[in-house]
Image (spheres, coloured by chain):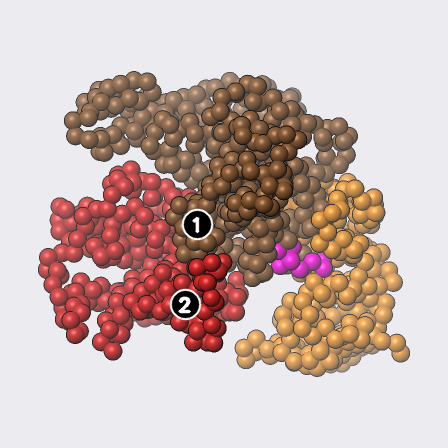
Chain colours: A red, B orange, C brown
Amino acid sequence: MDLILVNLIDGLVTGLLLFMLSAGLTLIFSMMGVLNFAHASFYMLGAYFAYQISLALGFWLGLLIAPLIVGVIGAGVERYGLRRVHQYGHVPELIFTFGLALLIEELVQFIWGKNQMPYNVPDVLNFTAFSISGNSIPAFKVFMIFVSVGIFLGLLFVLTKTRVGMIIQAALSYPRTVEALGHNVPLIFMGVFGVGTALAGVAGVIAGPVLGTFPGMAFVLGSIVFVTIVIGGLGSLWGALVASLLIGWITTFAKSYNIEMEGILNAIGIATPENLSDNPLRDFWALTSPQIADILPYILMVLILIFRPQGLFGKRES
Amino acid sequence: MSVPALELNGLKKNFGKAEIIRGIDLSIGKAERHAIIGPNGAGKSTLFNLITARFPPSAGTVKLHGEDLTGLQPFEINRRGLSRSFQITNIFPKMTVFENVRCALLWAQGYKYSFWNFVNRSRKLTEGTEAILEQINLANRRDLPAGTLSYAEQRALEIGITIAGGANVIMLDEPTAGMSHSETDYITDLILKVTEGKTLIMVEHDMGVVFGLADRISVLVYGEIIATGAPEAVRADPKVQEAYLGAALEAEH
Amino acid sequence: MIDPVTDVKGARPDEQITTNPADASQRMRMQTPMIAVAPWVIAILVLLFLPLVFTNNSALTIMNQMSITIIFALAYNMLLGQAGMLSFGHAVYAGVGGFACMHIMNMTDFFASIPLVILPIFGGLFGMGLAMIVGSFSTRSAGTVFAMISLGVGELIAASSVIIVAFFGGEEGVSGDRTYAQPFFGVEFLQQIEVYYLTAAWVIVSALLMFLWSRTPVGRMANAVRDNPERAEFLGYSSRWVRFYSFVASGFFAGIAGGLFAINYEILTEENLNTTSSGVILLVTFLGGVGFFFGPIIGAVVFTLVQTVLSLQTELWAFYAGSLFLATVMFFPGGLAGLLMMHVPVFKLGKAGHLVMPYIKTLIPAAIGVLGLAALVEMTFHYRHAATGDNEMTVFWTTFDSHTLLPWLIAGAITIIGLGIARATAPDLKEAWNEANTAGGGA
């Protein structure tokens, strides 16, 4: 029971982190129809910038400044890159963001090298917040939860209660009409792209010390983020939230409970074949849940796409 | 009477709470030229989209030569001999005019998903395509990308693609929309020529075209057909006068 | 810079990317068979005589690599260029085909009974089989959804390679020995040159088959579905099935490429499946140009050369390749083939000569400027990452101390002057270009 609670908290942290990325990605997608392949690269930039800033000015200023820089870079990418490619259609846009992701990774290696950066949890948060029957929950995790929830609430407030939010929501569905009403839609696009990438930057700043700040970090998380928004339903913010939490919990639980495929198969009435070591399916029989924890999201995605192609909360098929 | 080419029974469509099509019964005979007219927003294009399964109907059935089309995909309906054009020009803009028409002929000539025939080896395919190009007067444009044609030429190509497959029920959605007088005459003649002996159902705004072409006319107002009949009878119908023609005719004068 | 979007007369921006072989095929149709066959004869002759020019084994290895990439890139373009489907996980089909071939190599009795030359067919069949399974649900739609599924499935299979050890061999992969096959007219494929001719033969056969595919009804409809899936549906074709067939065919040829990889390297690992490999083939294809059938061939040749030459010279080659790729997407969405074909009207008008001087005036300074920029990049990299005390570096055969000011000034000056001249002469080039594309006498 206590272990379940610990896992719930760990899964929540992972899920909320995913959500910070998938929220921005979803906003950008539903507004511009572009799936930003480089989204996780902005997350990585957030972590690296925050590390560099924290060396000089400390963690807290890093948390403040790094996302701003990332957002400005993101807006620049939209303004000078994406907008240009937009005229060629969606596929080249997707290819563009893919190329951007490659380039950012190379750029990060160019500047900071291939090794992991010593970007650590700040001393003020480096203590145990509380413990559940021997399992200590670090304060930084609690802090991560607060930051993500805070950002989520802020986003919700801006989108539903403010004038800017109204215009954005309207521009999501009817960009032409909104433009005709005299709003600067390209500027809104740029702003949304900037904010979306800045959100990814925040995620990077707070995830960097825990998950590690290294050139592969974008790639590790990036494809999971795509999977998340596909599962949730492309363009659905609620879907992104649900799918993020779902994936966070599924992977955490799969890692901490050692469920064996043999056990499952025996339980549903399939007997273990004799001479298992010679059986061509031996690897399948020997699977354990921690082994496949990292590919569970992909399996989930494939299943969702087969049985509910529009995703959990998606309205349309495409 | 023989089986009608197209028969609609109690066809309805709601978008959310809005009823766009409120129960349409209509029977169109073989080789009939039938025009559907009505004010803007009456649901004419929606009706077309329901018949061709672009949208699923909320209720009711569509029968083509007596066969129920419910649940069929657009391509399956097309294979049963119903072909349509679109209000907004819907061609393959990056392919040549020739290619556009040839694509429309492939299924009709039985090539299906073949990967063992070569399209440019088939004399029948090439000649069929060229015959259609002659019919729509685009033979001299054959190697141009379709997207570079003039608007009227693109409309003609759209009609060519629609009839190329040899379907016997042809549906044209506002074939003369946005055209000048001379272009309209040209397209009208073209339609007369290419739908010879076929069932034609068209949505049209231009009353000149409608009365020149149609054997029968249906008037669609707010999702319901208020009158169906020969052009003269419809023109004389007081309900039609009131709902539509009166205003339209007045505006024209 | 030449801007294809505004400079190609009468072409709309989006045409650059998806111009299809359609009109080429039209022209081809009217030409005599001689001319249609000519490129293939030339290709065969070139492949036949290349080893006489480049005789050493490392050159043969590079050429084999090139051939494999050509097949893979052409297969990839059956999706991207011809059917408009963007896949982020296509390496999986080549990889699985390759792994299957490795396992066949290790089935001693069976392998001894077949000649090595037909082994790639098995790779193709396995790639095709996998494509049929995945395609059954992934081809429902094109565009973003297809791209995402391809990525997810790619990741899934790449990740399972370390789990399903029996098939993928875990971390060390699967290896075998090609020489255990039945000798083919006495050839045992012990030597690199024999493998070269085997690979070359497969390039010709595969490329020809893929070219012919684009002429079949389903190949033509792939173009139609790419441009306007809805209209295709109203012509009696299911867009989904057209995509499915394209996908399966592409999986087959990708599997052939995988089989040839197996023959050449006699080992396959997780690297053959992962997203990096999938990304590379996208890069190669796009760089070459998706709009023309031969685009991916150019892409494969150029990329393999750049990769082998640059990676020997600098650690940063992936950075340069990425920059080149991004620049292509942004400024030349037609790729190298698009750039070449832009010049066809100029040649037809007989005005190519008018472009020579403007090109020299702009492109040579631009190239010098770019090299200067590369030098700056290399110096920055060395300055940041070289071991302390190791201040010596060599760029462009010049050795100097990267911690002194002078080299920086020189490289900076070269960059600024080079790019500056290019910028100043660009308007003249643009004017010359427009002039060369205008029919009639002109000045």
Quadrant of the rendered image containing residue C201: top right
Total of numbered circles in the picture? 2
Which mark is drawn over residue C305? none
- Judged from this view, the residue extending furthest toward the right is B1
Q: Give the letter of the chain under mark 1.
A: C
SS for callout 1: loop
Residue B252, placed above or below residue A37? below
Q: Is residue C268 magenta?
A: no
Residue drawn 47% across the image and 29% down it: C305
Quadrant containing the C terminus of chain B is: bottom right
Q: What secondary structure is found at the residue carrying circle 2?
A: helix
Residue range of the region highlighted in magenta in the rendering:
C235-244
**x then y, percent, for residue C441:** 65, 21
Reading the image, the residue beneath label 2 is A261
The disc label shown at residue C169, or none: 1
Image position, residue C287 (x, y; %): 50, 37
